[in-house]
Amino acid sequence: MSVIYLLITVSIVVAITFLLAFIKAVKSGQYDDDYTPSVRMLFDDEIKKNPNNKLIQSQKEKQKSI
């Protein structure tokens, strides 16, 4: 019976350790997305919004329609 108490205690300590490691990784910015902003700038010309909330054509779309 004492082995069960020991295993439960050890498993709780390991779980808390992993939780703290995860929280530290999130706070240090390890899971920040660095890839998407670099790709997003390639597609910024596709559709732009006007200040009046109207969609305007990009230069590429204007050239295609001519």
Image (cartoon, helix red, strand yellow):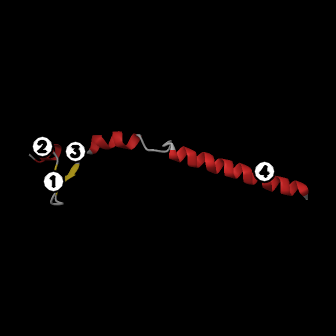
Residue on which the image places disc 2:
63
Q: Position of residue 55 (x, y in %)?
A: 18, 56
- Name the mark nearer the viewer: 2 or 3: 3
Give the mark, 3 or 4, whose residue is nearer the N terminus.
4
Side (left or right) of 21 relative to 54: right
Quarter of the image containing the N terminus?
bottom right
| Front: mark 3 or 4 | 4
Q: For residue 10, which numbered disc appears in the image?
A: 4
Dot 3 amino acid type: Asp
Residue located beneath label 3 in the image: 45
Which circle's residue, 1 or 3, is located before the other in the chain?
Answer: 3
**Among the 4 quarters of the image, the one containing residue 9:** bottom right
Question: Which tag, 4 or 2, sits closer to the chain's start?
Answer: 4
What amino acid is found at the position of numbered circle 2 in the picture? Answer: Gln
Quadrant placement of the C terminus: top left
Gap in angstroms between the C-alphas marked 1 and 2: 13 Å
Look at 23% across and 47% down and name the residue there. 46
Please give the residue where the numbered disc 1 appears in the rendered image.
56
Mark 2 Cα shell of 10 Å, populated few (<14), some (14-19), many (≥20): few
